[in-house]
Amino acid sequence: MSLEGRTALITGASRGIGAACARELRARGCKVVITYHHDDGNAAALAQELGLEAYRMDLRDRPATRDVAARIEAEQGPVHILVHNAGIIRDALLPLLSEEAWDEIYEVNLRGAFLLTRLLVKGMLKERWGRVISIASLSGVAGQPGQTHYSAAKGGLIAFTKALSKEVATYGVTANAIAPGFIETDMLSGLSAAKREQYRLEIPLRRFGEPEEVAAAVGFLASPQAAYITGQTLRIDGGLMTA
Ligand code: NAP
């Protein structure tokens, strides 16, 4: 399962699922580069802990995103494993949903994946090996009230993955999505205790997932052993959705 000699880029890896992915891919032997958004010290601490490079990238800023991605490639060499992890929620029922929130959710959760993949997939095609792994969401598969924008963006990310997988398959590049259910990260900090308990009881495994349980799947999908898996969406949700 070794990924020695490969370079991985993970967006939004200062905490949560992204940080767990950085640890997982580092443990599998590949060089890891992360991006962070706020300079709160988390990314620097992780970079020091794992001996990796960290770049600031705000996916809402289109020119800056392109520039930073190009700088990463120039300074770190071709990216073989691209993990679209950065994501945000701004929950609101549709009649109350602002146009600004719609745009922001689209920019961070979907447009960023387009901008980064368009640039970095070229290196993968040249190397005849690559992995594009997108952290989508169960909301993008099933839809979730209060998340029309988030569900649309994550559903778009899943469709993007399917189409991309067909474009790049003959070059040894795979594209897959992961659709987590409820995972214990800061993203769930806005849930009330009552809501948490309600959701927990709806999950057949009766608990929320851990970031490491998503990262393990990222590690496998990045591995040589997953070479025949492409265009898929893997749900990691404690059994919430089975159809
Ligand atoms: P998290 O702990 O809130 O981390 C989100 C990451 O995205 C942070 O590193 C954050 O950086 C970064 N980010 C936010 N805005 C950004 C921007 N404008 N540009 C670049 N990066 C930005 O969330 P998480 O739970 O680990 O989420 C990781 C992924 O899993 C997301 O795509 C999320 O949608 C998806 N997901 C999570 C769950 C869940 O239950 N946790 C469920 C389904 C899907 P800063 O900290 O600097 O803002």
Image: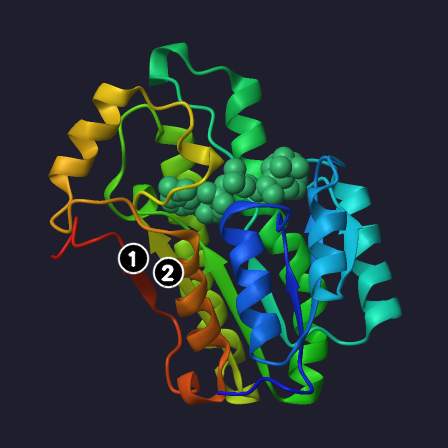
Q: Residue at x 74, y 57 (%)?
A: 47
Question: Residue 206 is drawn in which quadrant?
Answer: top left
Which comes before the other along the chain, label 1 or label 2? 2
Q: Nearer the viewer, residue 168 or 211?
A: 211
**What's the residue type where badge 2 is placed?**
Glu
The numbered dot on residue 236 is 1
- The image position of residue 23, as x and y in percent, is 57, 64
**What's the residue type where badge 1 is placed?**
Ile
Q: Is mark 1 within 8 Å of ligand 1?
A: no
- The image position of residue 42, as x and y in percent, is 69, 43
Q: Residue furthest top?
A: 96
Q: Are marks 1 and 2 in contact (CB under 8 Å)?
A: yes
Relative vertical location of residue 128 with respect to residue 35 in this rendering, above or below:
below
Q: Nearer the viewer, residue 153 or 215?
A: 215
Left or right of residue 185, residue 7 in this image: right
Residue at the disc numbered 2: 213
Left or right of residue 102, residue 140 in this image: left
